[in-house]
Image: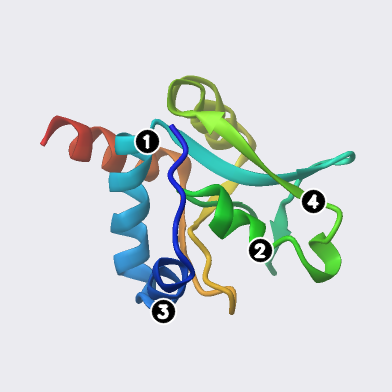
Amino acid sequence: MTETLTPAQLDAIDCMPAEQRYDYFINKLIELGEVWGLSSDTGWVILSDEDDEQLPVWPHAQLAESWARGEFSDCQPKAIPLTDWINKWLTGMEKDGLLAAVCPSSDGDSIIVGAEELLHDIKSARDA
């Protein structure tokens, strides 16, 4: 279920500290039942850091879309159903050593987390 955000809501989310955006992401993906990434004809956007690779993910298409500029201007937001995220993606990411960059802000600030920890946090929030 896609939720449309106002410009003021988008700005407020972008200005949240990374820890608060992480909690927001967890709660919204449970509520809305989907995760958003950026994809192009060549595949999903993967960010490379010195030691690891990260898949940036957001709880809303509009937040993902705000990243589709510059080197990612050929990318489009793409939804991943929550069941696929839990049952396929996180398992594959854990196996491949791919981390999640959770709800990166416009300046790139985000919580970087492993798939196992992210799955634990999703299950804990869902069971709460």
Residue at 59% over, 35% down: 79
Residue at 50% over, 32% down: 90
Q: Secondary structure at mark 2?
A: loop
Q: Amino acid at mark 2?
A: Asp
- Residue 5 lies, in percent from the top left, at 44, 57
Looking at the figure, which quarter contains the C terminus? Answer: top left
Q: Amino acid at mark 3?
A: Cys
Residue at the spot of label 4: 75
* Image position of 31 (left or right of 7): left
Q: Secondary structure at mark 4?
A: loop
* Image position of 84 (left or right of 66): left
Closer to us: mark 3 or mark 2? Answer: 3
Name the quadrant containing residue 6: bottom left
* Residue at far left of view: 128
Residue at the spot of label 2: 51
118 and 67: which one is in front? 67
Q: Reading the chain from its start, which is encountered first: label 2 or label 4?
A: 2
As drawn, the label of residue 32 is: 1
